[in-house]
Structure formats: structure tokens, C-alpha cells
Amino acid sequence: MKKQYRYFFISVAVCLFSACSSSPKAPDAVFLVRNEATKLVGLGSKAAREGNAGESVRFYEEAYRLATSVADEEGRIAALDGLASLRMRTEVSVSGAVVPAVASDPSSTAAQIDWAYPPTSAAGCIALAKTVAADSGKADLIAFASISEAEAALRTGAEADKRRASELALAASAALGRRPADRSRALRVLAEAKKELGDPKGALEALADAAASDKGLKRFAEYASARYLSASIHSKSGDYAAATVALLDALEADRRAENPAGIGFDFRALGIVAEKTGDKAAAARYYARSRDVFSAARFRTDADDAEKRRAALE
């Protein structure tokens, strides 16, 4: 009996001084705030797709604030990236001005009232994202931050900027092998740049790569985007059959993603292609479907455009 007690006390001592394997272990890190910021970035992206720009900005700004509060570089860059993409669209649509690839921004100077929030222009968000990425020293974050810079460069319309966009997107796609979703996006930007530079074959190759990856990841809205851009290239070259196939692929994917804006644009593009082939009846039906989707989703301007196209065929 004494021997049994001795063995019991020895085992207790071992547990106390060397931590028994049955004891609960502390986590390597806490991710509550970072996970919340990631969730908000996703909500910002969803709101942007649905045309709720103001709500999207609020989600992205809160994501940036949370990520900044825990020094999460990737979260900060993701929020800035979303804001840059959103503001590039709204700045162009509101003012008609072209957003420069990178420029200084007054809100990112010492005059900014609250440093917890991001710059108020696309150029400022892009510049800050590049700085955060460079400070991190991580090649994948640097590549990720360069995608929105490439997108902005494309929007200037300058030949040199188109080449710069192509170079940035190509380099990003090569550096993002372990981030397939971001790599696919870089490939889509590369395709747009190649299209603008008069290289439709190169553009279609990049899009095929992106589409295959997005389909495998079940990223249906992104797959639809690649197929939609492929359709525009086929249509421009006069291959309306291939354009129609690509658009029907895009439509099916956007339906699976429940992406109203994508669905509306797919139907409208199908109408444009049908009109080019001389099938006015099919074009009118597609325009009507586009009008109905846009109207139900509260995209009034796009709904009006689709209706005007339909009415013009009467």
C-alpha cells in the first residue's frame, strides 16, 4: 500500500512540474478581432456587389479600424483594397475624372482627424496599402497590394499605364501561388490589360487560367466575371457563338452566387450579342430580363438602360 501511495504522489508531482498532457493548452494566438475584420471585409464586398456603396464603405472602414487595432497587416490591406476598388468606381461615375494609379491624398497626412480610419480616396487607399505591405516585408502581401494599383493604372487609359498594369498583374499572379483566389483576380486584371494592349489571345489564356481556378474553388461570382470578360473579347472579334456560350456560363454562375448585378449585366450582354447577330426577338427578351433583374435589385439606371435598348428594337 505504501508503495502505491508513493507512485501516486510521484505522478502528481510530475503533472505539477511538467504539465500533464491532459491539461488544457492555451491557444497559440487569439483571432477574434482578426476574424471579425475578415467577416466585415466579406460583408463590404457583398454590399458593393449589391450596389450599396454607403453600407460597403462602413463595413470596410470598420474592418480597417479593427485590423489596425491588432496590427493585422493583411486585414488592413484587404480593407484598403476593397475601399480602393469601390472608390475607383464611384469617383469615376460621379465626377467623370480618371483615378491616377498612385497619388498623395490629403486625408493620409497629419491633417487627418482620426488615424483609425483609412484615406477617403482610391489613390490614398492604394498608397497606404502599398506602405503597409512594404512594412510587413511579406512578398505575398506586397503582391496582393499591387493588384488594386494595377486596376487603377488601367483606368487612366494611358498606354504606359496599361503596360504598367500588365506588368504588375503578371508579377502578382506569379507571387500569389499559395493564394489562389487572389491569383485569379490578378489574372483577370492581367487579361484586361492584355485586352487593352491588343493581345486578345493572351487575355483569353489568362482568363481561362483564372476561370479554371475559380471554378475549382467554387467562387462562382469570380468565375462569372472571367467568363463575362472572355465573352467581350469573343464579341469584339466577331465570334458571337463563343461569346454567347461564355455569357451563358457567366449567367449560370451568377445565378448560383445570387449576384443580381452580374445577372443583370449577363442578360444585357446576351441581348447585345443577339442584336449583333440580327436576332432582334431574342435581344428584346434578354433586355427585358435584364431590366427586370436590375429593377428588382434597385439598380435604376441600369434598368432604364436595358429598357431603352429593348424599346429601340420595337
Image (spheres, rainbow, N blue to C red):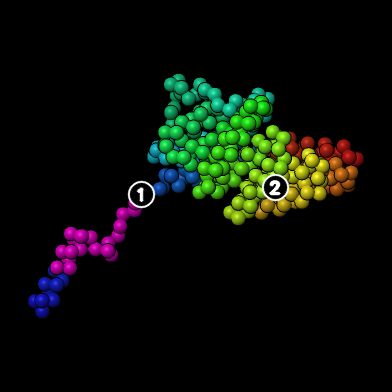
Within the image, what quadrant is residue 67 found in? Answer: top left
Q: Nearer the viewer, residue 53 or 210?
A: 210
For the N terminus, the quadrant is bottom left
Among numbered discs 2 and 1, the one appearing first in the sequence: 1
Q: Is residue 231 visible?
A: yes
Number of on-image labels? 2
Instruction: Report the residue at 85% width, 41% height from top.
Output: 276
- Residue 13 percent across, percent down from the top left: 15, 64
For the C terminus, the quadrant is top right
**Residue 182: mark in rendering:** none
Q: Nearer the viewer, residue 217 or 17?
A: 217
Q: Amino acid at mark 1?
A: Ala
Is residue 19 found inside the magenta-colored segment of the image? yes
- Residue 194 percent across, percent down from the top left: 67, 37
Instruction: Report the residue at 67% width, 46% height from top.
Output: 205
- Residue 214 percent across, percent down from the top left: 61, 51
Instruction: Report the residue at 12% width, 74% height from top.
Output: 5
Q: Secondary structure at mark 2?
A: helix
Q: Are marks 2 and 1 in contact (CB under 8 Å)?
A: no
Is residue 194 found inside the magenta-colored segment of the image? no
Name the residue beneath numbered marker 2.
Answer: 227
**Residue 29: mark in rendering:** 1
* Direction left: furthest residue: 2
State the extent of the magenta-drawn residues as a range. Answer: 10-30
Q: Classify mark 2: residues with Cα within 10 Å, few (<14), some (14-19) or many (20+).
A: many
Within the image, what quadrant is residue 256 found in? Answer: bottom right
Q: Nearer the viewer, residue 179 or 73?
A: 179
Q: Is residue 260 visible?
A: no
